[in-house]
Amino acid sequence: ILFFVSIVIIILYRLNQLNKNAQIHPKHIYRSNNQEEYVDKNGIRVVVGHYVGNPIHKIPNATYDMINTNNFDPRPGAGKNGNPVVIEPKDLLKMQQYFQINRFNLLASDRIPLNRSLPDFRRKKCTTLFEDYPSYPKTSIIVVFHNEAWSTLLRTVWSVINRSPPELLEEIILVDDASEREFLRKPLEDYISTLPVPTKILRSKTRIGLIKARLKGALVAKGPVLTFLDAHCECTTGWLEALLSVIKSDRTAVVCPVIDIINDDSFAYVKSFELHWGAFNWNLQFRWYTLGGRELKQRKVDATQPFNTPTMAGGLFAIDRQYFFEMGAYDDGMNIWGGENLEMSFRIWQCGGKVQIAPCSRVGHLFRKSSPYSFPGGINKTLFSNLARVALVWMDEWAKFYFKFNEPAGKIKEEQNVTSRLELRKKHQCKGFEWYLDNVWPQHFFPKDDRFFGRIRNLGENKCLIKPQKKVVSNQPMGIAKLETCLGDDLTLEMFVMTPDGFVMTDDSICLDAPEKVVLGPSKVRIMACSGYNRQKWIYDAETQEILHLTNRKCLDISDSATFTDGLVTTNCTGRRTQKWALERVAWK
Ligand code: LR7
Ligand code: MN
């Protein structure tokens, strides 16, 4: 009996082993049918399909040791020149366990040397522009972190040291926002005492969040310029000169680098799209959109010159130290994460400064699909409070618009004491949000008194134009223009703006779009990224109730042919009922 029992146990054990091997068989790498879904901190549904194995396979949690020990284990040449790191099949399970700790591929990061080389993606001209750099103001580098990994944090530090002119580095200040990891205590202190650039650590015993942590760093900084970085960045050649040169000639400029992408899975350094600037959507979420027309034109003249951006991403920028404090530093009523980037951008613009991107400066940032850390007080409460403060202080009537479409923020707005920030705004005689929209971001898609805002209803079918739901690039949903039963309750899905220029646009900078040229027969109408071109201009004739395309001179209509899959078309104006539209205004303030 014992013999048979042991045989059965051995067989079961072998089967289990086989199954385990199957789980991490290389064939399964990159298979993405077993996707993971979650809602990220911006409330967006994210689907990831990184290194998934057997569908029944569950990744064991990371162990206490994995989390608290420094597992930095560099392999010569790994990730060299920004190349992706390859993990052997035998390590895939471990890799997945480590992934959970910081929500990036920690195992890969830990194999890349701290001083890995990176490509130089700058234009040729950039390499000749900053020869007078010794005359630029020096800077303190401020990096705040909470439970950051050793390898990413110190690779950030080394990329600063190795790729900045030493004459321009005053010091590096690391601000530890109540990290719990053992290796970030004494071992980190010992390590930084050996660095060739004066480096110090400030510690916060309690979790204060990144905004207050940055303030803490700024208060002790000695350099005439403050340069902030996230704790998982890699600076490339020339990054600092290009930032400081702007501040040297204009102390009211807040300057950001072009932010490249460090892939969270492979740690490859990937060049990002340069023709983007930073703005935000109706929910006050930061977004990259296609550069505005004026800036595009300027870039055609000289693509190495800094260009204006409505907002900054938040983590990577340089600012004159005195100017930083003069202008109200940060709003210290904001907690943990979020909103401070819009707050600072609105404040700087409305109070006479400027926010710019210097294309000769490129810094990689490790983009994650979700946050690895806790939000004491709750993620929604934190984020909505921060954004409510932004709206209450800087957005005038548009604050009402924000609260109307973001009820949770509206519910906690009364709890916010923003008196001191409003005083600051008064003291600096800052301009209003309307000025900001008109002048800094004329391509915006917010409602305004000079334009229609509301529902676009087809009178033939009694249905409404809706925003497509599929997100294609940079979170901009796109697709064929379609009608849906008018909702009435969920406002955001069917709200459109029609600008005085004739753009029919909605949240996230997407526009009603049809071919510019006159063609025989109907043409497909889409909802696409706003481009500013004529193909996105329309005329509404209140008398005939037709929506006419500016250049192809046809009417917006419902397709009666199956080839257009129920989408809208432009077709010859005949006065038929499906070509009639009601623009139903909705109050927004
Ligand atoms: O409680 C905290 N305490 C901290 O010290 C929470 C975070 N942090 C640290 C954290 O360790 C990191 O170094 O703060 C830094 C930023 O936190 P991330 O990396 O989790 O933020 P993010 O990169 O997802 O978020 C972007 O938006 C934030 C809004 O508050 C900040 O402005 C971040 O700096 C910003 N990052 C960038 O702009 C990089 C480019 C991303 C884009 C687009
Ligand atoms: Mn970050």
Image (spheres, rainbow, N blue to C red):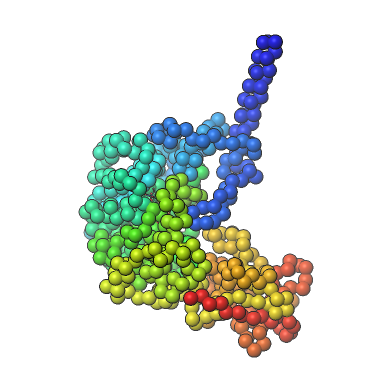
Residue at (29% x, 61% y) in the render? 329
Q: Is residue 524 visible?
A: no
Q: Along the horizontal axis of the image, is 179 left or right of 6? A: left
Residue at (43% x, 63% y) in the render? 412
Image quarter of residue 342: bottom left
* Viewer-nearest residue: 518 or 207: 207
In percent of width and height, residue 26 lies at 61, 35
Q: Quadrant of the N terminus?
A: top right
Q: Along the horizontal axis of the image, is 455 left or right of 276? A: right
Total marks in image: 0
Hey, which residue is sitting farthest bottom in the picture? 543
Residue at (32% x, 70% y) in the render? 422
In percent of width and height, residue 137 lies at 24, 58
Q: Is residue 545 visible?
A: yes
Residue at (26% x, 62% y) in the render? 325
In percent of width and height, residue 21 lies at 61, 29
When the figure is inspected, residue 467 is found, relative to residue 380, above or below; the finding is below
In percent of width and height, residue 522 lies at 72, 75
When the figure is inspected, residue 280 is found, relative to residue 198, above or below; the finding is below
* Viewer-nearest residue: 57 or 247: 57
Hey, which residue is sitting farthest left in the picture? 222
When the figure is inspected, residue 78 is found, relative to residue 379, above or below; the finding is above
